Amino acid sequence: MLEITRLSTTQPDFWENLDRLTSDDTEGDAAVEQAVTEILGAVRREGDAAVLRYTQKFDRLQADRVADLQIPPERLRSAFEGLDAEQRQALEHSAKRIRAYAERQRMDSWEYTEDDGTVLGQKVTPLDRVGLYVPGGRAAYPSSVLMNAVPASVAGVSDIVMVVPAPDGEVADLVLAAAHLAGVTRVYTIGGAQAVAALAYGTGTIQAVDKIVGPGNAYVAAAKRRVFGRVGIDMVAGPSEILVICDGQTDPEWIAMDLFSQAEHDEVARAMLVCPDAMYLDQVQQAMERLLPGMERSEIIRAALANRGALICVRDLVEAEEVTNFIAPEHLELSVAQPRKMAERIRHAGAIFLGRHTPEVLGDYCAGPNHVLPTSRTARFASPLGVYDFQKRSSLIHATPEGAARHGRVAAAMAHAEGLTAHAESASYRIRDHDQDG
């Protein structure tokens, strides 16, 4: 029997139960935090030597120099050229769609001139150097490489440095091929908190970056959290999430498999279905029980559904929207008759998949929008990774003598009110100069 939480909005304690089910412990594991603190400190003090030591300790990879841990560009190219036709076409198709979507996100500089000649504007520039962390070893996540590196490339980042752990020297060709296709500048076989530290602080070989992006384990997440401020980070992502709103008219097996698609990531992934039809919820649960034995990661799926899964019965689809906005899911499927109308009322979600024929898995690989999304209810205030994460804005202000006098009087009055005399005088010098010339 498949174990999964059943909730109903008719229950008097529904919202309390939902809050408990969707709340994440934001305090890191003490042992992880202590280990990460030690690693960050060692890399900051010792540079290359610490990176080499931790790489040998954790990945069993021996090297005399950090430079020896860099994968040459020819190796990336040969990995790409060595792919079979189907894999190569899939990678190129995905990269093309991700790039096309990213091109539309790029911000541009602008300015305008006021009546007194004052020019105001915004200058947009790319980051100089970005670090991309990619899970490695036998795990092959070329999609993560594309989703992180392509927007950086579109933004105009000139130096994209990728780090990927290579336990016992093993790294997947698909990952290297994706790095070649996405325009990654350099790749180092370094992983864990030591890789984050190297990117954040720099070593004798690796230059410090401006921002670190990409997913990782608990040690990587803790390290990114600790170095934020010295460098930018994309986000500290939690376990994968999916929430499906269904009106009860979609094939139950489709919905069951959509829930599985996220539950198979790990045992703390969150998979939820919201529907106003209790009998349909029963049908989906029955479909999951039928289909689960055929899944390679069935035990992980089973554990995830038991730990954090839920089948939620609501009074109507309007209430389903209210529940969704409370949960603020990473992935939201609207498997209903009028998904676009419903989407207008959804305020909090990382990515919204419209209609019965738009499974979340399309977003994971090749739809075009980024699959790096806010989790753990952070979609209330955060957005998907995009080109804008690799660009920064500078304000432009150019005052004429007339503008300096006009606005300076306001600035001086406000400065005096705040007790900041030098501020006021700085503005007043320009006012007096203008009045004398006038």
Image (tube, grey):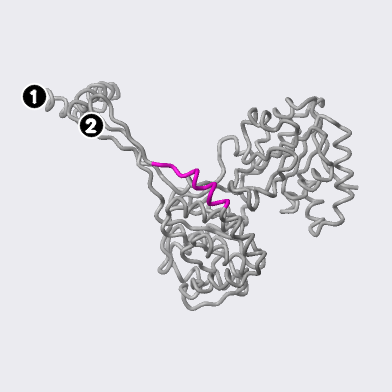
Instruction: Give the residue at x 78% y 46%.
Output: 307
Q: Where, by quadrant of the figure, is residue 346 drawn?
A: top right
Q: Secondary structure at mark 2?
A: loop
Taking the image as shown, residue 91 lies to the left or right of residue 286, namely: left
Amino acid on which the number 2 mark rests in the picture: Ala
Q: Nearer the viewer, residue 339 or 330?
A: 339
Residue lying at 23% horizontally and 28% vertically, measured from the top left = 117
Could you tell me the amino acid type at mark 1?
Gln
247 w.r.t. 194: above or below: above
Q: Which residue is mark 2?
A: 399
Looking at the image, tell me whether mark 2 or mark 1 is earlier in sequence order: 2
Magenta span contains residue 104: yes
Residue 299 in picture, x, y percent from top left: 81, 56
Residue 282 rendering spot, x and y as whole percentages: 88, 38
| Residue neighbourhood size for the residue with mark 1, other residues' Cα within 10 Å, grouped as few (<14), some (14–19), many (≥20) | few
Which residue has dot 1 on it?
Answer: 436
Image height check: is 147 above or below 46?
above
Q: Which mark is residue 75?
A: none
Q: CA distance from mark 2 to mark 1?
A: 18 Å
Q: Which residues are magenta?
A: 97-108
